[in-house]
Image: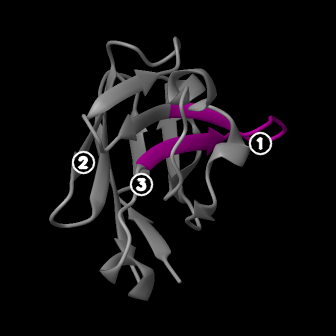
Amino acid sequence: QVQLVESGGGSVHTGGSLRLSCAASGSRLRDSAINYMAWFRQAPGKEREGVAALWTGDNSTYYADSVKGRFTISGDSAKKSVYLQMNRLEPEDTAMYYCAADFRGYSQFSRRWAWERTYEIWGQGTQVTVSS
């Protein structure tokens, strides 16, 4: 089993910054490596959407158009963690943010990084609120 625990959410004003963290733990990590980690978000009344993803194999990163240039995803393989640095936050970024991970290998991850079904493990989420 693997568990993902997010932290770092909070409330900020427009233009502020937050850094989300997601730590993976569990017995499965002793024998297997996580290939992909990602951040998704879900605002009230909206579907969950992919925000950013990281392929641990070569540290390739992927971003939704709405966050490019403002958010940065990074990982620490030793700590089995992934981070999301969020700058120049806007009220539209208000949402519950979820960490996701997967051990499987995909030939075209660049095409499926934002699909929920790509990831088999999910965290409980951390709330981000941006006020104007």
Residue 68 to residue 106: above or below: above
Q: Earlier in the sequence, mark 1 or mark 2?
A: 1
Q: Quadrant of residue 47?
A: top right
In the rendered structure, the answer to whether residue 26 lies left or right of residue 56 reads right
Looking at the picture, which amino acid does disc 3 mark?
Gly
* Residue 38 on the magenta span: yes
Q: Earlier in the sequence, mark 3 or mark 2?
A: 3
Mark 2 = which residue?
Answer: 75
Mark 3 = which residue?
Answer: 9
Residue 20 percent coordinates (x, y): 34, 50
Mark 1 = which residue?
Answer: 44
In the rendered structure, the answer to whether residue 32 lies left or right of residue 45 reads left
Looking at the picture, which amino acid does disc 2 mark?
Gly
Element on which disc 1 rests? loop
Q: Label 1 neighbourhood size at 10 Å, few (<14), some (14-19), many (20+)?
A: few
Which residue is depicted at the point 55% across and 38% down? 106
Whether tag 3 and tag 1 are in contact, CB under 8 A, the answer is no
Residue 13 to residue 124: above or below: above
Which residue is depicted at the point 49% across and 59% down? 103
Residue 99 visible in image:
yes
